[in-house]
Image: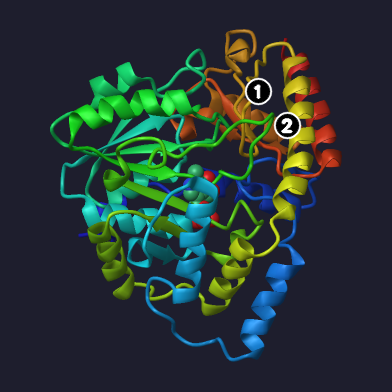
Amino acid sequence: MSIISNSLKRIKPSPTIAVTQKARELRAAGKDVIGLGAGEPDFDTPDNIKNAAIKAIKSGDTKYTAVDGTATLKKAIVDKFRRENKLNYSTNQITVGTGGKQVLYNAFMATLNKGDEVIIPAPFWVSYPDMVLLAGGKPKIIKCTEQEGFKLTPKKLKKAISKKTKWLILNSPSNPTGAGYSKKEIQDLAKVLVRNKMVYILSDDIYEHIRYDNFDFFTIAQISKLKDRTLTMNGVSKSYAMTGWRIGYAAGPKDIIKAIGKIQSQSTSNPSSISQAAAVEALNGNQGFIQKRSKAFKERRDFVVKSLNNIKGIKCLTPNGAFYVFPSCKGLLNKKTKFKTDTDFVKKLLEKENVAVVQGSAFGLDGYFRISYATSMKNLKKAMDRIKSFCENLI
Ligand code: PLP
């Protein structure tokens, strides 16, 4: 009999973390690897936020806090939702966890019974299906094509809903495609959900602040009658370059918020007191960093999209947000290249040219790969040259 539990056997380690680890190992072995696999901004955390953390340490803010977040941080989150999303919550509708990842994990653990279904539009963030599986639920993956802009349509949503559906996950702007849902697209999905009366919505807004070309951000609770059935998740990791600080949060129905807190009280307890103090400064302090950083990301996005579309066999849509592109490599999967899958393509690219990207199949859609352009222009230029010569040598 195995010591490892059956529920753990249902899941796999994160493929994006695996690629990052592989790139790290190759680099340690002396190879000149360019890692385009990691999902984190290369910018440093702004100084005002760092200083707030130092102040917290020096003033003894170093003890256990309330399990699901300090009163000060919850108030800053309430204010953020009111200011940026026109959403009114009370502090007992807010929970804070160790990263958005923990908040989502707790939400599934708190709500899923065996066999409950969760609709996950693909391409999806790699952790959603495995979290659902761990919690005993059933991921219902709905593929959204490139022609659909990698976005869920009302027709597909309607068809996907069954008596067992508990949640729909929406992630805009999206990891891995960068696609953002317009106000109308969200409202059209909401029409299906309002009629249905049962399904809850998990809106993952972690990339809210990284968007381009005046793309307007809307979250479903703000523009539909579904606020009472929506858990709106967000965090400071991507918006404020704070991935290592581990602070994420959510707002939603009191019973779900309370249940999430109960799980946290018997697992990790509160997120780091110091990180919480830093997150208060991130949310309440000067927001100038967001604009400056988005401008730099936009330059990189434009460069990467243009470079990829100049490569024979590669095709890349222009995303609205986040720091990813999701190009198609279908034009290079054939007898001549001997590549059958995107995984073959990605493996060889790393082996031959030392460029680490992640295969689309890891995100639920074959024939694509994900590039994270959260790295310097210098690295991106080098990487694009290498990808071009790699692809052109194949044909
Ligand atoms: N949601 C999406 C779509 C993400 O890409 C990530 C991180 O990669 C998260 C949630 C979790 O972010 P964190 O746990 O760092 O707050």
Identify the residue at the far right of this view: 378
Above or below, 41 relative to 191 = below
The residue depicted at 23 percent of the width and 37 percent of the height is: 199
Three-letter amino acid code of the residue under disc 2 = Arg
Above or below, 133 relative to 76 = above
The residue depicted at 57 percent of the width and 75 percent of the height is: 277
Residue 70: quarter of image = bottom left
Identify the residue at the far left of this view: 163
Which residue is denoted by mark 2 in the rendering? 301
- How busy is the neighbourhood of tag 2: few (under 14 within 10 Å), some, or many (20 plus)? many
Spot occupied by residue 167 in the image (x, y as percentages of width and height): 27, 40
Spot occupied by residue 355 in the image (x, y as percentages of width and height): 72, 36
Spot occupied by residue 283 in the image (x, y as percentages of width and height): 59, 62
Spot occupied by residue 273 in the image (x, y as percentages of width and height): 52, 78
The residue depicted at 15 percent of the width and 36 percent of the height is: 164
Q: Nearer the viewer, residue 198 or 64?
A: 198
User: The C terminus is located in which quarter?
Assistant: top right
Report, in whole angstroms, how far the alpha carbon at label 2 lies from the one at label 1: 8 Å
The residue depicted at 54 percent of the width and 72 percent of the height is: 276
Three-letter amino acid code of the residue under disc 1 = Thr
Residue 4: quarter of image = bottom left
User: The N terminus is located in which quarter?
Assistant: bottom left
Figure coloring = rainbow
Which residue is denoted by mark 1 in the rendering? 318
